[in-house]
Image: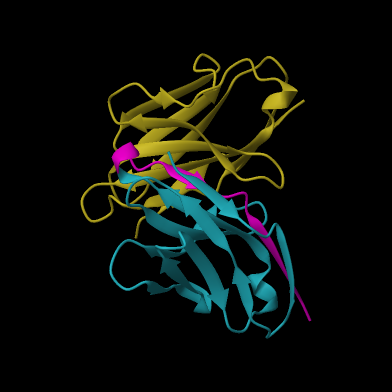
Amino acid sequence: GAVVSQHPSWVICKSGTSVKIECRSLDFQATTMFWYRQFPKQSLMLMATSNEGSKATYEQGVEKDKFLINHASLTLSTLTVTSAHPEDSSFYICSARGGSGLSYEQYFGPGTRLTVT
Amino acid sequence: AQSVTQLDSQVPVFEEAPVELRCNYSSSVSVYLFWYVQYPNQGLQLLLKYLSGSTLVKGINGFEAEFNKSQTSFHLRKPSVHISDTAEYFCAVSDLPNDYKLSFGAGTTVTVRA
């Protein structure tokens, strides 16, 4: 149980285009989803927290107009990187936190490797 | 706000030898503590967690960790490692009043050699 999927697993896009990454909780309802960014050989940096049906809360230094987060249902959150540039190339990981019984733990997706050319 | 320090960035170890990965945290409130493992190009997998109760926590794959409140530490151990334990290990802290956000340490790269 408590499986989180991400799609796509990897994506290559051209500079200036937008790309959407999906994060799904497959067998539980995720009241909160988190988006992280990880550069090579580095730790995970929290980008934003999203609760179903409300606006995402972004961490300091993260451009909310560039990284659009939507959490329209209890099982799906999306991250859209708008007008992507090579410096946006990174490994993006989502996690989900469920309701009672799962509330204290985050379950992580397998990650999405974004390469902007 | 909490912070997490993983004292070793890289730990080389021979197969079947023991390993200890050190983690210290700072927080002004009660916390939950986690260890995650990340294999190349993959997401994070939970090894074990401390929520309350016994300070010795056993996890998957033969790992265990001990919570020491006075030393604010949560060190991870395994008595005998395998080649397959080669991975990146992250210690994380959750400060519940802060909406369950996780703060991660910088990570420890474990390389197991035959």
**Chain in yellow?**
A
**Residue at 55 percent of width and 74 percent of height:** B77
Looking at the picture, how far across and down is residue A13, in whole percent?
69, 26
Q: Which part of the image, by quadrant, shows the N terminus of chain A?
A: bottom left
**Residue placed most toward the observer, B53 or B78:** B53
Judge whether residue A58 is colored magenta: no
Magenta-drawn segment: B97-114
* Residue B41 vertical position relative to residue A72 in the rendered view, above or below: below
**Model colouring:** by chain
Q: Colour of chain B?
A: cyan
**Residue A75 shows up from this direction:** no
Looking at the picture, how far across and down is residue B5, in whole percent?
57, 52
Q: Which part of the image, by quadrant, shows the C terminus of chain A?
A: top right
**Residue B27 shows up from this direction:** yes
Question: Position of A105 compared to B34: left or right?
Answer: left
Looking at the picture, how far across and down is residue B104, in whole percent?
53, 47
Judge whether residue B108 is colored magenta: yes
**Residue at 48 percent of width and 27 percent of height:** A59
**Residue placed most toward the observer, A14 or B51:** B51
**Residue at 39 percent of width and 62 percent of height:** B69
- Which residue lies most toward the left here? A100
* Residue B107 vertical position relative to residue B64 in the rendered view, above or below: above
Question: Position of B38 compared to A46: left or right?
Answer: right
Question: Position of A8 compared to B17: left or right?
Answer: left
Looking at the picture, how far across and down is residue A52, in whole percent?
29, 31
**Residue placed most toward the observer, B101 or B82:** B101
* Residue A30 vertical position relative to residue B39 in the rendered view, above or below: above
